[in-house]
Image (cartoon, rainbow, N blue to C red):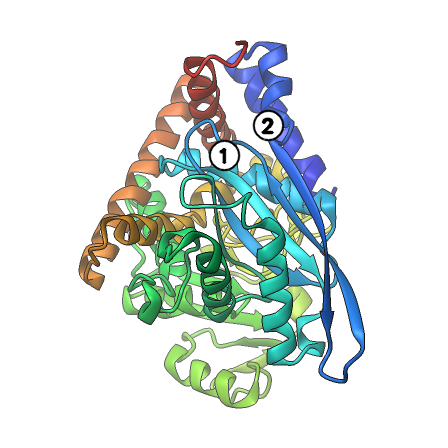
Amino acid sequence: MNALAATSRNFKQAAKLLGLDSKLEKSLLIPFREIKVECTIPKDDGTLASYVGFRVQHDNARGPMKGGIRYHHEVEPDEVNALAQLMTWKTAVANIPYGGAKGGIGCSPGDLSISELERLTRVFTQKIHDLIGIHTDVPAPDMGTNGQTMAWILDEYSKFHGYSPAVVTGKPVDLGGSLGRDAATGRGVLFATEALLAEHGKTIAGQRFVIQGFGNVGSWAAQLITEAGGKVIAISDVTGAVKNVNGLDIAKLMKHSAENRGIMGFEGGDAVDSNSLLTEECDVLIPAALGGVINKDNADDIKAKYIIEAANHPTDPEADEILAKKGVLILPDILANSGGVTVSYFEWVQNIQGFMWDEEKVNRELKTYMTRAFRDTKEMCSSHHCDLRMGAFTLGVNRVARATVLRGWEA
């Protein structure tokens, strides 16, 4: 099931539980605006190359639209659409004053030089500068983009609109980026996991964790879980998987991964098959890599009691049903990985105020937001008699629907 179909299915189920008006339901699904631009740049060898850039702005009922920009050879309009919609519900669940957006350029960033990437980013910004803005749409990094990309967008945008640090988030700290932003999604995963375990009288300490993915989110989650006393017994990345029943030494693994561009060959554990990682014996499973990894083929074999969705859409709806029957609790992506967008919001707030926070304040506020989002989701679960995924979706959809009606959507 592709991301758009799954997201729309979850939305429709939530709309049904909430008893939304069918016209309002349709209006909420349709994106506010879809942008498609042609970006032609001179390559380093003097030839011209053309790329297609997208931006889907899904909803702005609750505030400016917010979402990442990805550089990937498979930037597909359908997927961008699904991810933009997901951002609308995610920002509403986190209760931050944003709507959802997503964008990207169909290119392979690995095949482009730094100067080609800079030219491409600047041309893309020139084409969309009048459609993004501090109070309109605030981009952020995503797959294939980073703080440097945001710095170029900020610079190009500022040529047209004057110095505007709040137009993008995920910037380098020297240009108004927030402290704690780098670890934010992983730290949010930690706080969300703590909240879920506390609900069942448990703490991070003494639980066994398996993490799929060792990128930004996976590696920070592994570090922070270990610091909190949890035992990370298996991890995988694109190069392979490694397991140690007594717990992996995350600091050594980080060092190995940085030096060898992957965890393959790490000596502090045994190499295992990446495909069997998800079905390892553990208490908490954290998919922190790609979407659709837990499906009807492997759901039956999963031994974890809790699944924390650090990746976007890692669990197929068919797998959801199988896992629910087994009594596995799933903390859904729109709640579990909202730490990144929450700290992006803090960055935007700091830029608008022109007053920066210290890292303790960022982390303290993040904990407050994540814990509150979990509590609000649990309230929806009990009033609608549903699982955590539907609890989060009904919470998000309801907040957006209420804002839409209050603003007078029929006028």
**Closer to us: 5 or 17:** 5
From this view, report whether residue 195 is shown above or below residue 381.
Answer: below
From this view, report whether residue 204 is shown above or below residue 263.
Answer: above
**Closer to us: 174 or 313:** 174
Where residue 149 sits: x, y (%)? 52, 67
Residue 89: give its label. Answer: 1
Name the secondary structure under disc 1: helix
Residue 399 appears anywhere in the view: yes
Residue beneath label 2, please?
A: 11
Q: Nearer the viewer, mark 2 or mark 1?
A: 1
Disc 2 marks a residue whose amino acid type is Phe
Q: Residue at point 60% right, 83% down? A: 264
Name the secondary structure under disc 2: helix
Q: Residue at point 39% right, 55% down? A: 162
**Closer to us: 195 or 71:** 71
- State how far apart marks 2 and 1 are (Cα): 9 Å
**Circles 2 and 1: CB distance less than 8 Å?**
yes
Is residue 67 toward the left or the right of residue 247 in the image?
Answer: right
Quarter of the image for residue 375 reads top left
